Image (tube, rainbow, N blue to C red):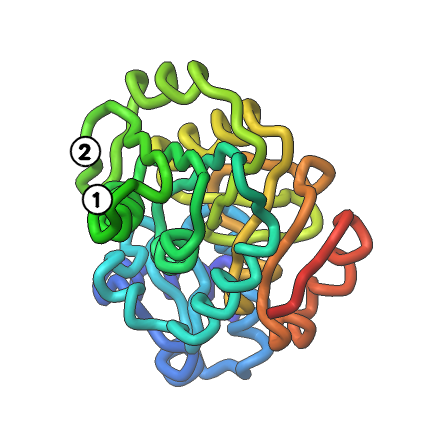
């Protein structure tokens, strides 16, 4: 079967099923696992799908945040704990929305004398509720204005971007959909990407939090080139990813949690 014919069949499967396993593609097309892997890589590069463990999904069908919150929890918690070593008392932090940054909020809430500027309602609530348990608030929490997203409990849009530009942060702690050595940190959603890009532009340092499954992955929109990433915090298992060695060479610092 010609490559374009295979691609068309994979598109048709995704259109019908929205998510399709590698095994299903192998069976339907009568091809090897390696052929499927190459085809999925090609189609992902065109932005027509996103590879996930065991197969692929349509880009718009990224797992809901409620579902992602229950995946790789230990990995995300380990990254969050390591990230606390990147911040110091008195600093201002940008934090975007995501399950990894939500785990980060749990750890940062244990610290004091931080100013957290975020578009994530979940992050803001976690930071704020921790402070309410004390006689004096431990940290200042600033929730950025804007429209609430349909995808995640976070603000976005032009108002959010303008709000970000009012602040200068010591550190931006961001969690992308994927990171690779060619395109840096990438995301799927336009609004979420613009928030992250504005945070990068207004921070002195950029720390990317990405669990091992995101290493070597690329989504539709790049918001932070590799040369602008100061630190990548990921898991030890990330060293097994094919792109890890090339990515590590281009980064200033990699922390394996």
Q: Is residue 34 left or right of residue 40?
A: right
Is residue 51 among what the camera can see?
A: yes
Q: Residue at x 37, y 15 (%)?
A: 162
Query: How many residues crowd around disc 1 within 10 Å: few (fewer than 14), some, or many (20 or more)?
Result: some
Which quadrant of the figure has residue 257? bottom right
Query: In the image, is residue 147 above or below residue 77?
Result: above
Q: Nearer the viewer, residue 136 or 26?
A: 136
Q: Nearer the viewer, residue 108 or 193?
A: 108
Q: Which residue is mark 1?
A: 153
Considering the numbered disc 2 on the image, is that residue within a helix, a strand or a loop? Answer: strand
Q: Residue at x 50, y 58 (%)?
A: 4
Considering the numbered disc 1 on the image, is that residue within a helix, a strand or a loop? Answer: loop
Point out residue 205 in the picture as x, y percentages from the top left corner: 63, 36
Point out residue 24 in the picture as x, y percentages from the top left corner: 35, 80
Point out residue 123 in the picture as x, y percentages from the top left corner: 31, 47
Query: In the image, is residue 15 above or below residue 156?
Result: below
Residues marked 2 and 1 touching at CB (< 8 Å) = yes
Q: Nearer the viewer, residue 207 or 130?
A: 130
Could you tell me how many numbered marks the image carries? 2
Q: Specify the label residue 111 is tagged with.
A: none
Q: Residue at x 61, y 76 (%)?
A: 237
Q: Residue at x 51, y 44 (%)?
A: 173
Q: Specify the label residue 148 is tagged with.
A: 2
Is residue 2 among what the camera can see?
A: no
Point out residue 254 in the picture as x, y percentages from the top left corner: 71, 58
């Amino acid at each position: 079967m010609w490559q374009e014919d295979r691609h068309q069949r994979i598109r048709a499967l995704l259109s019908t099923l929205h998510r399709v396993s590698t095994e299903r593609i192998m069976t339907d097309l009568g091809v090897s696992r390696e052929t499927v892997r190459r085809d999925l890589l090609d189609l992902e590069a065109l932005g027509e799908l996103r590879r996930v463990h065991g197969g692929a999904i349509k880009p718009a069908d990224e797992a809901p945040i409620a579902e992602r919150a229950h995946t790789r929890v230990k990995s995300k918690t380990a990254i969050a704990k390591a990230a606390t070593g990147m911040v110091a008392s008195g600093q201002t932090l940008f934090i975007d929305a995501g399950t990894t940054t939500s785990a980060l909020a749990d750890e940062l809430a244990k610290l004091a004398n931080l100013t957290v500027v975020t578009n994530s309602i979940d992050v803001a609530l976690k930071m704020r509720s921790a402070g309410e348990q004390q006689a004096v608030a431990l940290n200042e929490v600033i929730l950025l204005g804007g429209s609430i997203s349909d995808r995640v409990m976070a603000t976005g849009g032009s108002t959010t971007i303008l709000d970000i530009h009012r602040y200068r942060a010591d550190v931006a702690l961001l969690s992308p959909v994927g990171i690779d050595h060619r395109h840096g940190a990438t995301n799927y959603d336009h609004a979420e990407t613009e928030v992250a890009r504005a945070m990068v532009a207004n921070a002195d340092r950029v720390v990317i939090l990405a669990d091992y499954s995101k290493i070597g992955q690329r989504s539709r929109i790049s918001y932070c080139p590799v040369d602008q990433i100061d630190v990548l915090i990921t898991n030890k298992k990330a060293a097994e990813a094919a792109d890890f060695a090339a990515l590590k060479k281009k980064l200033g610092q990699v922390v394996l949690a």
